[in-house]
Image (spheres, helix red, strand yellow):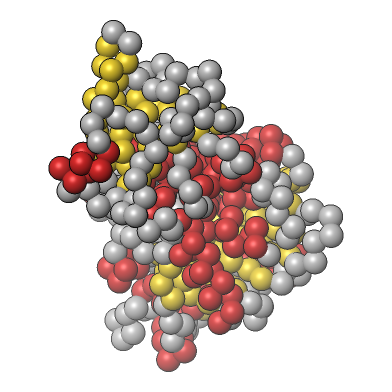
Amino acid sequence: MPISPYTLLTGAPSEPGAAVPAGVPPLGEAGLLAVPFSADRAPEVELPLPVEALLAHYEAKGEAGEVVEVPVANGDGVGRVLLYGVGDGSAGALRKAGATVVRRGRGRSSIRVVLPEGPVAAFVEGALLATYTFRIGETRSAPAALVELVGDGVEAEVARGAVVAEAVSFARDLANTPASIKTPQWLAERATERAEAAGGVDVKVWDERELRAEGFGGILAVGQGSVSPPRLVRLSYSPQGATRHVVLVGKGITFDTGGLSLKPSDGMKFMKTDMAGAATVIAAVAALAALGARVRVTALVAAAENAFSGTAQRPSDVITQYGGRTVEVLNTDAEGRLVMADALAYADAELDPDVMVDVATLTGAISVALGKDVGAVFASDDALAAELTEAGTQAGERLWRMPLIEDYSPALESSVADLANIEAGSTYGAGSITAALFLREFTGGRPWAHLDIAGVGRSTADEGFLSKGATGYGVRLLLDWLTRS
């Protein structure tokens, strides 16, 4: 399992202050119980020492991520009570608290956690995501096999948190899978399976012959150097009564060598996650039915492997994107925008969306600008940018709005085609901005936002609710936004 299973224990406390259901051993089978506290609220648990004195001894302030461990009798053995801080009780604080306390259960068969007050769904997200693991081969330092959550009247919140956490986990699994397995066809098959399992999501997949017949020149050009042919996947969620249509586009480069504009070896090591945007939109759409979303959503996954060979596209090639725009390919490592442009142009021409949002690990430049903790949003519509930024804040996936600087548009000019895929020289720079300006050319003037997640799509650390590797960034953000619509 990518994340540990959970169970929700509900009912009246077995004794005053015990905060566990009647008939259930207070510490659980593994002898590990976690109980919340804050600066102004003592933990509701009986301990062999006065709780106030104990917290004072450890100078505990109840901050999110703070844990005080107390050994207690457990039959003939010793158990542990973990007093965990919840900070100000906000969603962000509880997400951090959930992750911190559940990480203390690593290697145990289970951990029992008394749920805090407040946004319980965020706590559950953090707790379950902290147990995520992806390993091919022998598992080491395994997470708690079972997370037991104790609370009453929180069933809906716990269920939502679990759905969101599982969706993020699925996105991480897709991105962490090695490219020796993860061909465009494999990604299309996983998307199809996920949609069918979710229910209420229709699927269409274009193979290379259909892509050629319908004029998806960007996807074909990027994929032509690989022995694994490209695919385009459409996932359609259409609940009854929906009046708004949102199109999500995900970059699905299953491995990126850079093509003939070859990447350095060190930069290539992480390119199995260059389809993280595609993983995000697949996972998000498949979770909508379980969350009762009332908005119509179509996800487009433009999947290709950017390889180098005798059939690969060359710098200076001119390709024809879907809809007829021509593009001079000055750098084959700027390939994500080519496959995304096809999908955006198709959405504009055929799907008549009210809003378009694309998600992509698009530019290394955005990592220089914003680092590893904040994603970028470029938008043609102020209200859309504000909605996504607010959703990111609530979901714990921060966005920073970046500008679409019109003065930089000449960077896309070509002497032989309608557009160039990168700037020919170094007059303007601003690689992330010019990449966004390129994508905007294919949106038909519709309200559109571009999320560049190159910096936040991968984590180098195993801490909190993140694990080393793919983060699943964007799933929580999109689900928060789409379920408000």
Residue 89 rendering spot, x and y as whole percentages: 42, 55
- Left or right of residue 108, residue 8 in this image: right
Q: Nearer the viewer, residue 316 or 89?
A: 89
Q: Nearer the viewer, residue 42 or 226?
A: 42
Q: Is residue 315 left or right of residue 157?
A: left
Quadrant of the snapshot with the C terminus: bottom right
**126 shown above or below 88:** above
Residue placed furthest toward the left: 57
Q: List the single residue furthest toward the top.
A: 76
Q: Position of residue 457 (x, y in %)?
A: 40, 53
Q: Is residue 472 visible?
A: yes
Residue at the image point whose x is 51% and y is 52% from the top: 119
Q: Is residue 227 above or below residue 339?
A: above
In front: 182, or 456? 456
Q: Residue at x 65, y 35 (%)?
A: 193
Residue at figure coordinates x 49%, y 52% from the top left = 118
Say which residue appears at 25% left-offset and 36% top-offset.
50
Q: Position of residue 84 (x, y in %)?
A: 32, 42
Residue 259 placement: quadrant: bottom left
The image shows residue 31 at horizontal and vertical percentages of 35, 20
User: Depth check: 371 or 178 in front?
Assistant: 371
Looking at the image, which residue sits at the far right? Answer: 241
Residue 362 in view in this figure: no
Q: Quadrant for residue 367, please give it.
A: bottom left
Q: Quadrant of residue 9?
A: top right
